[in-house]
């Protein structure tokens, strides 16, 4: 499950950031991919739909806690684990 979450999250981020998934790692900073708050919100909504979860973050909190791709993946994994 966790590899699927990681792969799908990276794929969504790559699509939104117009980058190649192979060039994105957990350490990649969202700001490097030119992902602004609007794009981050769209990514979060797509992740919610794909995994049938709800990520309760407002944009200000998201930018405080989600700096890297890994931060976003870890948040998704925690929410999924808490729901099962």
Image (cartoon, grey):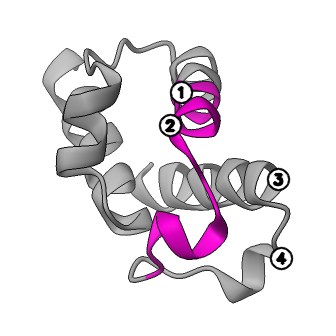
- Check disc 1 and report its element: helix, strand or loop: helix
> Closest to the observer: 48 or 80?
48
Residue marked by disc 2 = 37
Pointer 1 or 4: first along the chain: 4
Pointer 3 or 4: first along the chain: 3
Residue 70: % across, % down: 35, 66
Badge 4 crowding class, 10 Å Cα cut-off, few under 14, some 14 to 19, many 20 or more, is few
Residue marked by disc 3 = 15
Residue at mark 3 to residue at mark 1: CA–CA distance: 14 Å
Q: 9 above or below 47?
A: below
Residue marked by disc 4 = 20
Q: In front: mark 1 or mark 4?
A: 1
Q: In front: mark 2 or mark 1?
A: 2
Pointer 4 or 2: first along the chain: 4
Q: State yes or no: discs 4 and 2 in contact (Cβ < 8 Å).
A: no
2 lies left or right of 13:
left
Seen at 26% across and 21% down, the residue is: 57
Residue 36: % across, % down: 56, 46
Seen at 61% across and 15% down, the residue is: 49
Residue at mark 1 to residue at mark 4: CA–CA distance: 20 Å
Most common secondary structure along the magenta stretch: helix
Badge 1 crowding class, 10 Å Cα cut-off, few under 14, some 14 to 19, many 20 or more, is some
Residue 68 covered by magenta stretch:
no
26 lies left or right of 23:
left
Pointer 2 or 3: first along the chain: 3
Q: State yes or no: discs 1 and 4 in contact (Cβ < 8 Å).
A: no
Pointer 3 or 1: first along the chain: 3
Residue marked by disc 1 = 41
Residue at mark 2 to residue at mark 1: CA–CA distance: 6 Å
Residue 71: % across, % down: 28, 59
- Using the image, tell me which numbered label, if any, was put on residue 62: none
Seen at 54% across and 38% down, the residue is: 40
């Amino acid at each position: 499950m966790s590899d699927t979450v990681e792969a799908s999250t990276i794929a969504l981020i790559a699509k939104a950031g117009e980058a190649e998934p192979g060039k994105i790692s957990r350490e990649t900073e969202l700001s490097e991919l030119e992902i602004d708050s609007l794009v981050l919100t769209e990514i979060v909504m797509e992740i919610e739909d794909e995994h049938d979860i709800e990520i309760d973050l407002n944009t200000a909190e998201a930018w405080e806690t989600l700096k890297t791709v890994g931060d976003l993946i870890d948040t998704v994994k925690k929410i999924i684990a808490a729901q099962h």
